[in-house]
Image: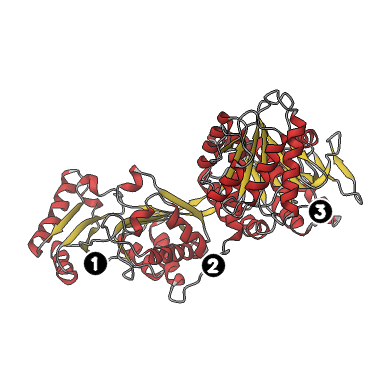
Amino acid sequence: AGFAEIGGEGVERQDELLAAVRRAGMRMVGPNCLGLLHTHADVRLNASFAPNMPPRGAVGLCSQSGALGVAIIALARRIDLGMSSFVSVGNKADISAIDLLEWWEQDETTDVLLFYLEAFGDPRHFAPVARRVGRRKPIVMVKAGRTEAGGRAASSHTAALAASETAVEALFRQTGILRAETLEEMFGLARALTQQPLPRGRRVAVVTNAGGPGILCVDALEGAGLEVPRLAPGTRATLNAFLPSAASSANPVDMIASAGPREFRAAVEVLLRAEEVDALVVLYTPAGMFVTESVAESVVAGVTAAREAGIDDKPVFVSVVGDEEETYAIRDDHETLPAYRFPEEIGRVLGKMVEYAEWRRADPGVFVTFGDQSLAEARAIVTGALDERGEGWLSLAEARRTLEAAGLTVAPGGVATSAKEAAAIAKEVGFPVAVKLASLQLVHKTEIGGVVLGLQDAEAVEAAYRGIEERLAGMGRADAMDGALVQPMLEGAAEVMIGVNQDPVFGPLIAFGLGGIHVEVLRDVAFRVAPLSDRDASAMVSEIRGHQLLQGYRGHAAADIAALEEALLRMSRLVEAVPEIREIDLNPIFALEPGHGYRIVDARIRVA
């Protein structure tokens, strides 16, 4: 302690230390850390304050908190989780989490990467590295500082800015990082990932000797987005051949309390061979009829037999419910099965494993460029506005020109500065039209009567323009009117929105959701951190709850989803190329039918 985390003299002290290290041609871990260790037989290094080495294994751990890191090492020893290395990075003045990712990427002794972080140093560099490494080795992270108070504590602890929780979640989705809510869950995931194969699908079979734990397990599995399917007739017939008549061969398979080692082994082998099963959960509640160890041995023997028969892509999880001694794994010479205290834990762990497996199998996506984008022109518009007026909102005309330079489709129309000009624009674009207040000072137009819809002729347009002038004059805000935007009335398959907000740590955070009033009422919005790949854009559109509406629902026309995905990609390129853009709100966007694109109706852009 006593370095950059305390500010002032601590920052100077840290800078002096780092300069001395670099003059010597070395790298530095920390400061404000508890050191590092490596368990490989050729190294056996313990340069930390940890009193004991953890068991040797394939897990690498990076902890921003030194004291917590030592506690985690002690826990690893208690649950017999093998570790390859541990690094307490502290203030990350030199060696960072990114450096460790790149080191572990090429380290053949490390298969699973664990992180406890309180703040990201350079997430825009971290993201592409994590995306690349995560396709080969799973990354599990506990990100502390989720709440406002936690963020303040993390900042004072590590002298780093706190990122928004929305941006953190978006980054994890894009990079395949498995987020653990607690340290306990992090170790539960680590045990599963090091001891079992990744599941090939979402279908889970459950076998139990007690109904209650089976029901809890099914609820947890389905709550995690997994499926507990009906077993095939052939599978059920094979189970019924050795189960007592009172048992149930449905899923979950309830073998009742009389089930012993023979039944458990047979059921495990049958279910792992079943084509309709991708993963297996085994629940055992000690009933006094059998020794727990004998049942555990039979379960492992059944799994081993299935593996020898070539079934090596289905993970198996165990929970000994109510056992007096907590069990973390059951094993023989060939197989290790992760064990958990309660079946709900298995649901959470398996759900995240499945999500990671799907992310890893999917196409990684590409970062698309567009030859028709005039991004230099867009930036010139923005910097010109900044030079003229300083930070703030672009005018409607400037916002439209900026979007058009990026190749985004703005609804036809124009900004008028008189009633006569408004009528002329209306005649050009075609009736009926809408007239909307254009103002740099007033952002919300509807509340002050600044939006008039469905105007059928030039006289109505002129009257609407003068009406807006009169309402502002009555409020003493006549000077706030810069003109009015005249647009044709549009109809689309759906209204959506695209937004951008600059996160202080992550940079541009892009949002997509249902538009109009829905965005404020339903808050059905997906987020990603720029830059977006085509896979990111597709996921954003498909993961909102209102996606069914965009596909066409109960007689409503489908929207041009491909065009909306392209709009997201163009927006990503725009905000990357014009860093002066601090905020964008495109709402509503009328999504037209497939092949007809979309039209941006309202646009606000704030620059600084």
Nearer the N terminus, badge 3 or badge 2?
3
**Left or right: 515 with respect to 454?**
right
Disc 2: CA contacts within 10 A as few (<14), some (14-19) or many (>=20): some
Which structural element holds mark 3?
Answer: loop
Residue 456, position as x, y percentages in the image: 10, 62
The relative height of residue 243 versus residue 457 in the rendered view (above or below) is above
Nearer the N terminus, badge 1 or badge 3?
3
- Residue at image mark 1: 413
Residue 104, position as x, y percentages in the image: 76, 54
> Which quadrant does the N terminus fall into?
top right
Q: How many numbered markers are drawn?
A: 3
- Residue at image mark 3: 109
Q: Are marks 1 and 3 in contact (CB under 8 Å)?
A: no
* Marks 3/2: CA–CA distance: 32 Å
What amino acid does circle 2 point to? Phe
Nearer the N terminus, badge 2 or badge 1?
2
Which structural element holds mark 2?
Answer: loop
What amino acid does circle 1 point to? Gly
Residue 302, position as x, y percentages in the image: 72, 44
For residue 367, the mark is: 2
**Left or right: 372 with respect to 587?**
right
